[in-house]
Amino acid sequence: MRELLELVVPGASTADLCQHGDDLIVQKCAAAGFKSVRKGVALPTSVNVNNTVQHYAPVADDDENHPAYVLQENDLVKVELGVHIDGYACTAGHTTILNPSTDFPTTGAVADAVTAAHFAAEMAWRMIKPGRAASEIHEAMMRIASAYKCVPVRGTYSTRIQRYTLDAGNHLYNAIDPEATDADGHKIKQEDFQFSVNEAYDVQIYLASTTHTSTGDAIITDTDSAPTRTVGHPTLYHRDPNARHTLRVAAARKLISHITQVAETYPVTTAGLDTSLRFGLKECTTHGLLVPRNVTRTADGTAVAAFRFTVLLLPSGQVLRLTLPHQQLPYVCSDHEMPVELATLLFLDQPNALRVPPVPAAQPGGVTPPAEGSSGGSRRRSRSRKRSKSRGSSVDAREPL
């Protein structure tokens, strides 16, 4: 993510950024070892700009009717990607602003959306623990959004993840589309649940400003959610493991076989498919074997900010954030303030939260200096350290301030 964000600059093509992000994942997975297991892209890179919410991953060789967007100054850019090793996925999402001046912060509706989304994501991370009800986290997110004159985006949600699936149930909706229905035609409702140990969650926070980014005029009048609309044509698809159909077109059969072998049920991008395989998309989507991930946007003139990370609830009751917050946050200044009781929680390290300890400084030769009073037995100590890591003692619990 950090390497990709360095390339997010004015003049960059979103299609090139998406392709570079996927190439980085493949390259780093190849160098990560684990040669006997599958590994690679769990969520193709998408670059969503301004009021675009999700799944914008244009293809460089697409037709002239759907040219890839080229980034411009003052764009609000959201980058998302995911990687898996042996089917166990980790996702990440970050928001940045292409501010031409590093001396002056971004203000207005854009600053409100970024600030609210960042604080809501950090609040969710601090509140998630075994036994906690999802409704409590949603209530805190709504209070933060309201304080910054923002609303959650409809159709976006955090979800439990399992091996080879990014959606294993337990949806924590940011906001529910009142017209959305499930596969059986029933209206989608938020069902409360409690977080449990031995679970992993893909936490996704999407908040939109209610006012115009330039004029400040009110655009979204709904105080609970921001409606979305589908735009363009999808380039991301995932396989429905429960769908069955006998395909007649040879290209469709080859496509399903290719996706099953490469990605299982993880999404794939058409940029990574040969032209011969793309001919099978229509039949596969018509019969529900492949499900498109539509590109969505909020009202024109609004700003959407998003942050995404993965958490793991350990058997000890502690929570490990797998996607570390190493990315530089954009320079913004909002005119609004957060409620005092919520701000207090943000500045406290929770006792159930875990952090990865810093790597000890190594000498120029790459050898870590031994501790004082130690002599010899380096191989024995090395094995001891490996054993202690397997027991989880290499990760320390944070103490409350």
Image (cartoon, rainbow, N blue to C red):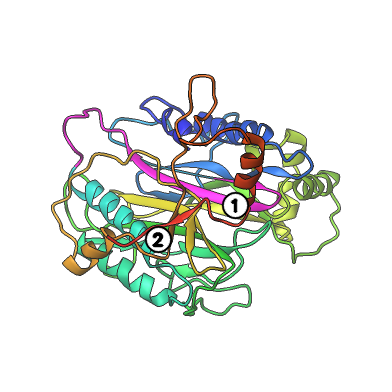
Q: Nearer the viewer, residue 207 or 29?
A: 29
In the picture, residue 48 is in which quadrant? top left
Where is mark 2, residue-wise?
A: 125
Q: Tell me, for residue 147, which label it has, or none.
A: none
Residue nearest the viewer, comparing 324 with 265: 324
Nearer to us of marks 1 and 2 is 1
Residue nearest the viewer, comparing 354 with 66: 354
Residue 293 place in picture, x, y as percent: 57, 53
Amino acid carrying label 2: it is Trp
Q: Does the magenta run of residues contain 88?
A: yes
Q: Are there few (<14), some (14-19), or many (20+) residues within 10 Å of tag 2?
A: many
In percent of width and height, residue 290 lies at 70, 55
Q: Is residue 227 visible?
A: no
Tell me the element at label 2.
helix
Name which residue lies at 83% across and 49% down: 253
The residue that label 1 is drawn on is 388
Residue bounds of the magenta highlight: 82-106
Q: Does the segment drawn in magenta span residue 71?
A: no
Q: Amino acid at mark 1?
A: Ser
User: How many numbered circles does the render carry?
Assistant: 2
Q: Earlier in the sequence, mark 1 or mark 2?
A: 2
CA separation, marks 1 and 2? Answer: 26 Å
Do the CB atoms of the residues marked 1 and 2 lie less than 8 Å apart? no
